[in-house]
Amino acid sequence: MPTYTAPVKDMMFLFEKLRDNKNYNELEKYNEVTPDLVKDILEEAAKINQNLILPLAKAGDENPAVLENGIVRTPPGYKEAYQKYIEDGWTSLSCDPKYGGQGMPKTVSAFFDEMLSSASLSFKLYSELSIGAYNCINHHASNEIKDKYLPKIVEGKWSGTMCLTEPVCGTDLGLLKTKAIKQSDDTYKISGQKIFITSGDHDLTENIIHLVLARSADSPSGTKGISLFLVPKYIVNEDGSVGPRNGISTGSIESKMGIKGSATCVLNFDDATGYMIGTKDKGLSAMFTMMNLERIVVGIQGLGISEIAYQNSLAYAKERKQGKTNNSKSSNGADFIIEHADIRRTLLNMKSIIEGERALCFWLSQQTEVSLYHPDEKIKHDASDYVSLMTPVVKSLFTDLAMEITSDAMQIHGGYGYTKDQGIEQLYRDNRITPIYEGTNSVQAADLVFRKLFNKNGDIINKFLDMVKSECESKNGKVKTFSKELNYYLDILSKFTGWIGDKNKIEKDDVSAAANDYLKSLGYISIAYAWIKILDVSFNDFNTNEEFYSDKINTAKFYFDKVLPRAEYHYKSAISGSSNIMNFKFN
């Protein structure tokens, strides 16, 4: 089984040194969230993830969730761990104190999300969708529904899901068939089938609150006729107690490649009682409140799995002996494989990507909080644009790179990595879903180039590029060398953006074919921007902790030398166009 040590030191470095966002620091509601408080939270989070949750990863993989006589049973140890998990208040970490939450910012909860993803993604998914449901209900439901449902969700006694996908539609939700018929008491009867529902049914909570997309009988076809409904597994009585079973049943559990401990269900709704959330026929936009936050969290899943894959690869490379290097340190026998140049390159590739991603995610967490709570509307608007731009990047690039990193981890472990004994192949299998769910990575790339770059709010990408350039130009000293190099790639991205804009007017197939390349170029450059922030601190504070900051500087140098050039490759690949692709005759 893989081992794991939560990277609390690196997380605290970010929280203490990279809170350089003036707008974030103006949020009075977080004045009491001090580094000492955050350190205490992260150290406790590390304990529960390392000691209680990590063993559940292997248990869930070997003994998946099962459906028995209409009841979903979670893997051994899950119920006991979940009870401890909610007793310690982890479901309430980022929720509003009004409903029993602790009110921690995303800059803290994102670190916990990463730890939990490293320890056991399957276990994490039972509470992750609950927080998504909480956010959606909190943003769009009536006060009556909020008061009735949110306290139990925050407490962890009730969980939540989102029910979008059907046999006839995944990405194209306009095709959905689930019906909603209004009743005389203003409730609705919901009928239809939903598939691939994460944590759709289980035995961890006393109720499950499903958020279901459906179409009213008098609504138009397509996405413009979709409404959102709250449909509980058990009807909730007026006093808040759990009442009779609603018209929801579990048809089956999917047999999957990975995340086997997570129950991915087919749910049948047969005249189930539901309550409309938000405005009629505006359900898709309401659901995207949940989806967009969830996409960032999925990116963090990739980051968390990458971290545990790296930690175990590094440990293995330090203890495994094979072959002799050109500068062998062994007089008899083999060298540790960490002495081989290619292994060192692979490990540094992992490390430089992971630490850059974590820093970018921390920056994005600050922007998210500003977009939600800053009193100045223009500042909120600008931050919201940055979050919108970066959401598909974090979701897609972090999960794609996690596939690269978990594959490389298997390679470092050799034959042992391919066997189940080490647990490395499970990391690869568990991560494989992350580029697929919550909108496939190709859909994310299309969303970026067709909707996010030049949307109704204006030219977001150039606003972002100008912001990064301005920050790079303000850097002095040793970091200036890195800033100049980043400027070279910013110019490439600017040309790439112009090419996308021009092609979007005359040849959309060129844009479609280039979408993934553009997203990756933007992503690698954005991670480099995060590294500039780290380098600025590292050079300025070098004498206070030479070992720590030398590590940061040398890791950043590897990223700029060996990883960042991928951004230019993707540009050159993209501008070759799509004619060969679209004209190719498949036999």
Image (cartoon, rainbow, N blue to C red):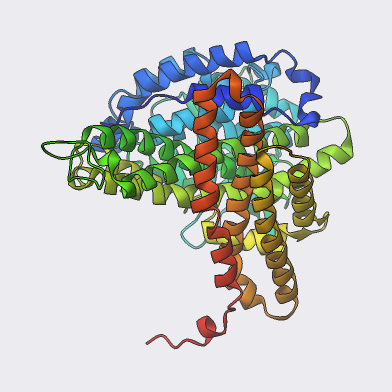
Residue furthest left in the image: 332
**Residue drawn at (66%, 76%), measured in percent from left and top?**
508
Nearest the viewer among 248 and 405 is 405
- Res 16 quadrant in image: top right
- Res 506 quadrant in image: bottom right
Left-right relation of 59 to 12:
left
Vertical position of residue 445 compared to residue 408: above or below: below
**Residue drawn at (46%, 45%), measured in percent from left and top?**
197
Residue 362 spot, x, y in % from top left: 62, 34
Residue 44 spot, x, y in % from top left: 48, 14
Residue 138 spot, x, y in % from top left: 69, 31
Asked if residue 103 can be seen in this view, the reply is yes
Vertical position of residue 157 compared to residue 70: above or below: above
Quarter holding the N terminus is top left
Nearest the viewer among 378 and 462 is 462
Asked if residue 224 can be seen in this view, the reply is no
Left-right relation of 338 to 494:
left
Residue 103 spot, x, y in % from top left: 67, 19
Quarter holding the C terminus is bottom left
**Residue drawn at (49%, 45%), measured in percent from left and top?**
558
**Residue drawn at (33%, 35%), measured in percent from left and top?**
314
Nearest the viewer among 293 and 483 is 483
Number of dots carrying numbers: 0
